[in-house]
Amino acid sequence: MKSVANCRNTAVLLFLISVFTNCLCAGTVFNDSNSWTAYQAPDANGFNSGVFDGRYLYFAPYCNADGYHGRVARFDTNGNLENANSWQTYDAGENGTGTDPDGYAGAIFDGTYIYFVPHYNGTKYHGEVLRYDTNSTFQNADSWTSYDPGANGVGSDPDGYVGGVFDGRYIYLAPYFNGTDYHGEVLRYDTTADFEQVGSWQSYDPGHDDVGTDPEGYWGAAFDDRYIYFAPLHNQMEAHGEVLRYDTNAVFTNSSSWSTFDPGENEVGNDADGYNGVVCDGRYLYFVPYHNGTEYHGEVLQYDSNAPFDNAASWKTFDAGAKGIGNDADGYDGAVYDGSHVYFVPYYNGTNHHGEVLRYDANHLFTDPNSWNAFDAGANGVGDDPDGYAGGLFDGKSVYFIPLYNGSDYHSEVLRYRPYYCGDIEKDGDVDFVDFAMFAEWWQRQDCGQCGGADCTGDGNVEFDDLAKFAKNWLEGK
């Protein structure tokens, strides 16, 4: 009889699903604390950006309470974020690799290898690129190698980089500060050639060949399938907005292959200077606002890559915080695009190392305030102190924010956003048959507390209102 009753209940549920498909699920998943998780990654802290290889997330080692370090953290996205067994760490330098492979600011994946972008190792701004072979064992010294092109005669002083990008063949590192100067010496590696050979590497400083006004001090880069764009942060004189661009169809060391444009100097926006990163959504590029020389700011800069680079009409800015969005939506470090939205990674807003994620819906008008919202997970009860992040990653389901410094400590509290939909009882990021079976089980119970996630309305029962929300999200493919 029990099996008959269960079958009957299932038939009733299937019928009701067809009835309630037009019922709306209240609220937005972005502003729902259930969509957010924070977890202290084990064995390491203080990272600066990272990369996803299709299964694992790698966090680039930067600085902790003991100094600049080289301890890479890796998370297996097939595992549970909150399970220590899903995490591994490895310090290549402590296991005999290289000279002093510490202090990295970014990571790049070429399909086989992870390259960590050299910044500062605690002694000097350096150029020792660290590389890991993803086809080999993570915690094995043979899987790791390092190479310092500048120490082997490449370029003038190719040290101190922040971020970079892969164009399908070449790795480009974004020049920032080499220990003496804010510089513009872009470093490039040919991934089809031997990693530890001088001939595989080139550097070029466009400013030294009279390109632009003062193209130095860049923080991150992006690729739009033809051009490489470098995000302007600070040159030798000031926070600046002179975007540097390279045409990958042209000769790397030819000045004609390079160009610059400063939107702010051409009356775009209010004070469009000082950007900590850039991300591309396939057409538009978004430059991440940090500090414009006067204040920590939130003026996002957008460029339409289908339009002329050196035309002010191709550029726009929007300051969400100035339009009343969020609490203090300023001071970001990196951005993530998930296929529909751009997430700006919170770092420091001039008052606090903060956790207020700013999000733009790339399917809607850039300058429409309704396209933007902000959410601070920590201020809404998530985690311990999820503030101060440097870069982010998207693994196909979730956006991860990479922990650096929260105002008190170099920390390891990874913040994750995965849309929580009514009925995602399995909590795997979607609503499917597995959730339906679990929903049917909860449907038969009374006074079930939180009902295993089936109680969308939070009233302690699973009933028709919950079914309406569950059915809509299932049939919409949430």
Image (cartoon, rainbow, N blue to C red):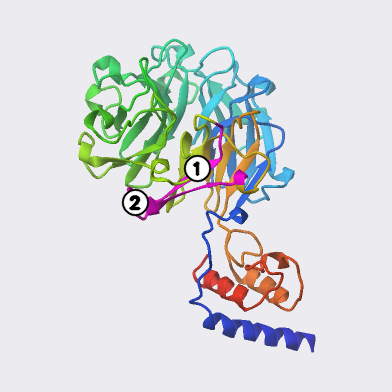
Q: From the viewer's perspective, tell me whether residue 13 is left or right of residue 184.
A: right
* Residue where numbered disc 2 is placed: 368
Q: Is residue 116 located in the magenta-colored stretch of the structure?
A: no
Task: Inspect the image, locate mark 2, and give the three-letter code of the amino acid beneath it.
Answer: Asp
- Percent position (x, y) of residue 80? 68, 50
Q: Is residue 369 located in the magenta-colored stretch of the structure?
A: yes
Start-end of magenta stretch: 352-379
* Residue neighbourhood size for the residue with mark 2, other residues' Cα within 10 Å, grouped as few (<14), some (14–19), many (≥20): few
Viewer-proximal residue, 359 or 40?
359
Q: Is residue 184 above or below residue 34?
A: above
Report, in whole angstroms, how far the alpha carbon at label 1 lies from the one at label 2: 18 Å
* Res 112 visible: no
C-beta proximity under 8 Å, tags 1 and 2: no
- Percent position (x, y) of residue 299? 37, 37
* Res 453 visible: yes
Residue found 37% across the figure and 15% down from its top = 236
* Residue where numbered disc 1 is placed: 327
* Residue neighbourhood size for the residue with mark 1, other residues' Cα within 10 Å, grouped as few (<14), some (14–19), many (≥20): few
Q: Is residue 150 above or below residue 323?
A: above
Task: Inspect the image, locate mark 1, and give the three-letter code of the amino acid beneath it.
Answer: Asn
Q: From the viewer's perspective, tell me whether residue 308 is left or right of residue 5.
A: left
Among all residues in the image, which is located at the extreme top? 180
Among all residues in the image, which is located at the extreme right? 1
